[in-house]
Amino acid sequence: MQSKSRLLPATRPTRGSEAGFTLVELMVSVAISLVILAALVAMFVNTSGRSREMARTNSMIENGRLATQVLESDIIHAGFWGTHVPAFDDQTTTAVPADTPLGVPDPCLAYDPTNWDDQYKVNLVGLPVQVYDAASICGGVITNKRANTDVLVVRHADTCTLETGSANCQAEVAGRLYFQSSLCLTDLAPYVFDTTGFTLLQRDCVTAAERRKFVSNIYYVRDFAVTAGDGIPTLMRSEFDLSAGGVLEHQPPVALIEGIEALQVELGIDDISETGAAVDYTAAVDWLDPSIRTTPTNRGDGVPDANFITCTTAAPCTVPELMNVTAVKLYVLARAREPSRGYTDTKIYSMAGGTTLGPFDDNFKRHVFVTTVGLPNFAGRRFTP
């Protein structure tokens, strides 16, 4: 007997398996996605803004530190003249100093054997640091100087000699000005500035004495970086060197560090001896106890006395002050190159001589860097055990 097969109806899909997103569900999903996207965009914008702001701040700080380091590395060599020590600052001499500076030298006087006379050279060697608060010197060199900033002059002999042949030392250049100091007692001059024809000798009075490049740097702040009116204050430096026209003079200034808005300088003066008596270079060294010679009564002790001073147009620094400088205090005001949105600078910045700068009421962030640099080539000679 044949069994009859039972035909089952085809399975029909349920309503739930055919259903997609409804319009309401789609709109809700889009809305949630937009909220998440907006949050991500806001986070990205905030993070990017903070990163840019941090980059601006870091750049400002690095520029300020670099400017301070550049100035400090030059100032610390001020008054270095190789083996030569000015007699007025040499406590081993027993005679009245014959090389006391008598005037403040023009820092931008071009070299010429006729105008660089013996006294000018004495002044140049004995006053290695000069400060001015106005661009009244070096016309044509110091241009577009920013207001409320100082001009700093630093002089010394190069730490490299032409005889060393070191890879880090500049080779001799014909026509460039060099300094040579003598150690031979029979030489007629203690030192010379010249371009050629050096004849001074070392202690054996046979070997030629070392020659070093004459270094004179002028620092100031210009009110623009590359193009006049760009509004980026910049630390500038003019170097004494041989011009394209063959003249030995201070060259056009070169931009060093952007974002430096102000440079001000104070000088530490050592014009009182350890005994409290005033410095007097018109007499030989007077020792409190001649038998041990540890305390001179008419020479400085290497330590700045009283408060640091400022050099102004109304009260310029004098020869006795400049020849007794043993420390330099720097005030460097660094400014961000770009403004910060939503920030207003209402701060007041303390600078040299008790002066202040600000508030600027603009959108630039600023920071003051202050450092004191000792002059070992002057202060070190005055220290006694």
Image (cartoon, helix red, strand yellow):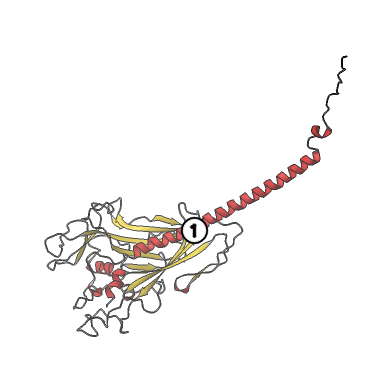
Question: Which residue is painted at 27% across and 79% down in the image?
Answer: 299
The quarter of the picture where the C terminus appears is: bottom left
| Rendered residue at 83%/32% (across/down) | 14
Answer yes or no: is residue 65 visible.
yes
Q: Nearer the viewer, residue 166 or 314?
A: 166
Please tell me in which quadrant of the rendered image residue 30 appears: top right
Snapshot quadrant of residue 88:
bottom left
Whether 46 is drawn above or below 324: the answer is above
| Location of residue 22 in the rendering, given as x and y in whole percent from the top left corner | 80, 38
Q: Residues within 10 Å of mark 1 (few under 14, many from 20)?
A: many
> Position of 322 compared to 283: left or right?
right
Taking depth in this image into account, of 124 and 260 the one nearest to the observer is 260
Q: Does the image show residue 138?
A: no
| Residue furthest top in the image | 1
Q: Nearer the viewer, residue 372 or 317?
A: 372
Question: Mark 1: which amino acid?
Answer: Met
Question: What residue is rendered at 77% in x and 43% in y?
Answer: 28
Q: Secondary structure at mark 1?
A: helix
Q: Which residue is mark 1?
A: 60
Quadrant where the N terminus lies? top right
How far across and down, in percent of the image, does residue 360 sit? 55, 64
Q: How many numbered circles are shown? A: 1
Task: Give the image quarter of residue 282.
Answer: bottom left
Q: Is residue 300 left or right of residue 6?
A: left
Residue 258, position in %: x, y?
Answer: 46, 56
- Which residue, as the protein is rendered here, is positioned at the far front? 1
Please state the horizontal and vertical placement of residue 259, each as a whole percent of the image. Answer: 47, 58
Give above or below for 18 relative to 207.
above
- In front here: 347 or 173? 347
Image-based side of 221 in relation to 126, left or right: right
Vertical arrangement, residue 17 with respect to residue 180, above or below: above
